[in-house]
Amino acid sequence: MSTFLPLQDATGPVRVIQVGAGGMGRAWLRLLSSTPDVELVGVVDLNLETARAALDDLGIHDVPVAGSLTELAAVVDAQAVVNVTIPAAHHPVNVEAHLLGLPILCEKPVAPTIAQALSLAAVSEATGQLLMVSQSRRYFRALAQYRRHASRLGEIGALTCDFFKAPHFGGFREEMPHVLLVDMAIHAFDAARYVLDQDPVSVYCEEYNPGWSWYAGNASATAVFEMSGGARFSYTGSWCADGLETSWNGSWRVNGANGTALWDGTSVPVAEFVQGLAFDDGLPSSADDDSPEEIAGALAEFVSALRTGETPSGEVHSNILSLAMVEAAVRSAESGQRVLIADVLNAAYEQALSSEQLPAAKAALEGGLGELISMTPAAGR
């Protein structure tokens, strides 16, 4: 597991360079420019006009722009990077930032493949810099309350998530293969790990594309995961499902020996326990909590980690298992077979080991990171 030291100057706002100023980049620019705990000190984008236009639209006129992170880091006193580039650029940008001595908060997925994610975990270890993934949907207050309900249900038998939306994105998403699994399902997969406090063991998945779909790749899927505590997590979703749509968080049900809890992805979750069982966890309900949500929640945890040295929930080593759920589901859909998470992790590890070019990162892969892959319960050892 990567260890990192807190910032030496932890009193003032964390000075941040944002890389990527496209659609999601604008949301991050708005957040970074309005959050007292951070100071936006620069923006990097291959298209300088895109970056300048995004800043102008937010009324920001004094932040420098460059086409290269290395170029900009040489002239501004940055302490961290927020990476909002397209997934294919995550690996090179993250490596560049770490080699510059900068910790990173990266949009999901941390990399397009598990092999690249393992490489990034190794670079994080080699440089001693934090790499945190913004699994923004972990930061819904209602989800935290739902997790507390689930923890009171005793042995868990089943967790289900139904996700039905009909967005017309245009652009790259509508041309992606496995679009639902690769671009969206990781949120639900990661949330399942969080709610159950269990990790994946295997998956069987089917995906398909309805005849009316406007996506080139398969926009619908059903996946059933065996989890390390014996529960089954079932996910059914579609991105071409007009009418009576679920929330963006999906609709959830968890059943255990002591009862059932429901969450519609928006409202306060509810639970019904078997006769004679009740609880009061003494914590505020999601309706009373005012902690930041979505990307603001991810940013708050990132800043806190940099100031305290405490490992955040989205730290790259842990997040790899959520990414492994996606890759395993894709393999199962392609092969028609049940896929073991162990097989996916071990194959990705061998690929990462053979292709790693940085000597220090290769040593990290051969050392502690290799031991982590071999010892994790999700690897079937």
Image (cartoon, rainbow, N blue to C red):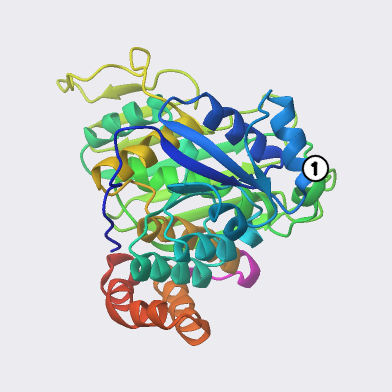
In x, y percent, where is residue 340?
43, 70
In x, y percent, where is residue 79?
42, 47
Residue nearer the viewer, 185 or 161: 185
> On screen, 287 above or below 108?
above
Q: Amino acid at mark 1?
A: Glu
Residue at position x 37%, y 53% in the image: 315
The quarter holding residue 38 reads top left
In x, y percent, where is residue 318?
36, 57
Kindly tell me whether residue 12 is visible in this rendering. Answer: yes
Residue at position x 53%, y 84% in the image: 355
Mark 1, residue position? 49
Q: Is residue 337 magenta?
A: yes
Q: Is residue 95 left or right of residue 155?
A: right
Q: Is residue 81 magenta?
A: no
Name the image quarter holding the C terminus: bottom left
Residue at position x 25%, y 24% in the image: 273
The magenta region covers: 333-340
> On screen, 287 above or below 314?
above
> On screen, 78 above or below 303?
below
> On screen, 340 above or below 138?
below
In x, y percent, where is residue 91?
56, 64
**Most distant residue in the top direction:** 288
Q: Is residue 85 left or right of residue 354?
A: right
Residue nearer the viewer, 1 or 130: 130
The quarter holding residue 29 reads top right
**Most distant residue in the left direction:** 276
Kindly tell me whether residue 166 is visible in this rendering. Answer: no
Circle 1 sits in a helix, a strand or a loop, which is it? Answer: helix
